[in-house]
Image: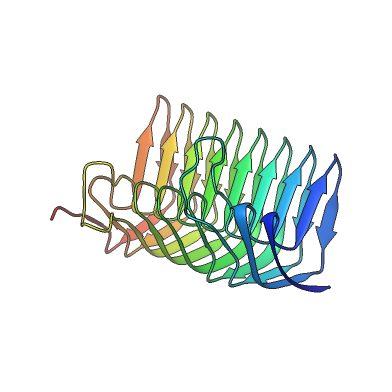
Amino acid sequence: VGMKGHHSKGGAVNVIGDYSVITKSKFEMTSAAIDGGAIYATGNHINITDSSFNRCKVSHDYEAKYVHGGGAIYVQGDDALIANSTFDQTNARIGGTIYIQGINAVVDNITSNRSFVSTSGGCVYIFGLNALINNSDISMTNASVSGGAIYIEGQYATVANSNISNSVAKSQSGYVATNLGGAIYIHGNNANISYSKIDGSTAMDGGAIYSIGSNSIVYYSNFTDNLAQAN
């Protein structure tokens, strides 16, 4: 399925209901005024797999009752799965490619290039416990606040078997105190980052990773050319 379109929520698809599945689809040049540049989904056990997203976006306007999240995908619900998909040139106010609010979210085997946000989570923003990002490649992302590639708010977050390169947390006026985690920002206890590679990422603090919380662990990971930068 190929889709082009514009809508306030879900530039191409707006889904309400548990156990919804979107698979083997192509989304190109879709946009939304509020959330979900290509897909807006509410419900538990949402599955989005084996699809491609190109030049999808959400308005960067600030409105108190909307997050303006998910340049390609916005999901509100538990046990979401986004897997085996590619993303290129996506942007939003928050979560430049993917925004998920809910527990047990899984982002697995995605490739994402050239995404940006005017706040946090240059590629992925997850708010919820037990978030997992696995086996993914993320490159050339930018957040104007924190989490140049990934921003997770919640305990027991895991980033594993993933590569992140050339991600930046930097405001339009330069590096400021809120620019935390050039590649990854995690706020929550028991964070786990393993078997991953982070290259060429920059922020004011935590050029590669900025983690707030007890019992966090980073292991079997490689870091190259990352920088904590001041103006």
Q: In the rendered view, tell whether residue 19 sits above or below residue 154.
A: below
Quadrant showing the N terminus: bottom right
Displayed quadrant of residue 223: bottom left
- In front here: 212 or 123? 123
Q: In the image, is 141 to the left or to the right of 230?
A: right
- Which color scheme is applied? rainbow
Q: Position of residue 117 (x, y in %)?
A: 44, 56
Q: Position of residue 124 (x, y in %)?
A: 53, 52
Q: How many marks?
A: 0
- In front here: 30 or 62? 62
Question: Which residue sits at x=42%, y=47%?
Answer: 120
- In front here: 149 or 18? 18
Question: Which residue sits at x=55%, y=48%?
Answer: 68
Q: In the rendered view, tell whether residue 10 sits above or below residue 17.
A: below
Question: Which residue sits at x=27%, y=64%?
Answer: 225
Quadrant showing the C terminus: bottom left
Q: Position of residue 16 (x, y in %)?
A: 82, 43
Identity of the residue furthest to the left in this view: 231
Q: In the rendered view, tell whether residue 135 sits above or below residue 213.
A: below
- In front here: 40 or 190? 40
Question: Which residue sits at x=78%, y=52%?
Answer: 14
Q: Position of residue 94 (x, y in %)?
A: 49, 49
Q: In the image, is 147 to the left or to the right of 67?
A: left
